[in-house]
Amino acid sequence: PEVTRDQDNESGTPLMTACRKRCPLEVMEALDARDPMVAETCGLTRMHQVCSASDMDVSRFMEIAASDPDAIIRETADGETPVDFLLSKEDPSICAALCVAFPGRALHHFKGLRFPLMHYAGLNEKTAEMALDALLRSRKVASKTGVQTTLDQREVDLSIL
């Protein structure tokens, strides 16, 4: 565990460095498992790790979204959200998947992005349709119940991503 707490000259732990260098998720999970307090101390959530992984798996962040609707806006100690860790912040497929996972954040303006996620999802016809459908269904549920809820991701076909 002591090694996982060592910091480089930029105050980065091995886990933070692995995230910034886009290591495979398996590497980050192994570092996190060795000493979970490191991630907790610097505010590095599972969503940050999944978004930064070189082998990012959309289904993994869909799982996290189902259990934590605010995961996409949680910040590290340095003020970075998981969106800051994405390899390609403007990729229509990734942005559409984020809109599906977090429909309440589809129109949110994240720092580092010139436009909301929905804009980038709309750059491709299929991803635009998927993201817009998710947004409209979440709004319909909210208007019927008066409560903003997360979308039931089982209803969304992610095979196009």
Image: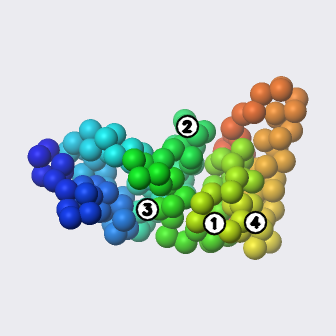
Tag 4: Cα neighbours inside 10 Å, few (<14), some, or many (≥20)? some
Q: CA distance from mark 3 to mark 2?
A: 18 Å
Q: Quadrant of the C terminus?
A: bottom right
Q: Are marks 2 and 1 in contact (CB under 8 Å)?
A: no
Is 116 situated left or right of 22 in this image? right
The secondary structure type at the circle numbered 2 is: loop
User: In this picture, is 141 found above or below 71?
Assistant: above
Left or right? Give the position of 112 relative to 134: left
Residue position for label 2: 68
Return the residue at label 4. 119
Q: Residue 10's x, y, as percent?
A: 26, 63
Q: Are marks 3 and 2 in contact (CB under 8 Å)?
A: no
Residue 142 higher or lower than 51, as above or below: above
- Say whether residue 71 is left or right of residue 50: right
Judging depth in this view, the residue of 115 and 142 nearest the camera is 115
Spatial separation of the CA atoms under disc 1 and disc 4 = 10 Å
Secondary structure beneath dot 4 equals helix
| Residue 52 numbered mark, or none | 3
The kind of secondary structure element at disc 1 is loop
Q: Which mark is residue 113?
A: 1
Q: What residue lies at 75% left-to-right and 33% top-to-bottom?
A: 148
Kind of element beneath mark 3: helix
Screen quadrant of the N terminus: top left
Separation of marks 2 and 1 at Cα, in angstroms: 23 Å
Of marks 3 and 1, which one's residue comes earlier in the chain? 3
Which of the two discs, 2 and 4, labels the residue nearer the N terminus?
Answer: 2
Coordinates of residue 130 in the picture (x, y in percent):
76, 59
Residue sitting at x 24%, y 51%: 31
* Dot 1 or dot 4, earlier in sequence: 1
Q: Nearer the viewer, mark 2 or mark 1?
A: 1
Report whether residue 24 is seen: no
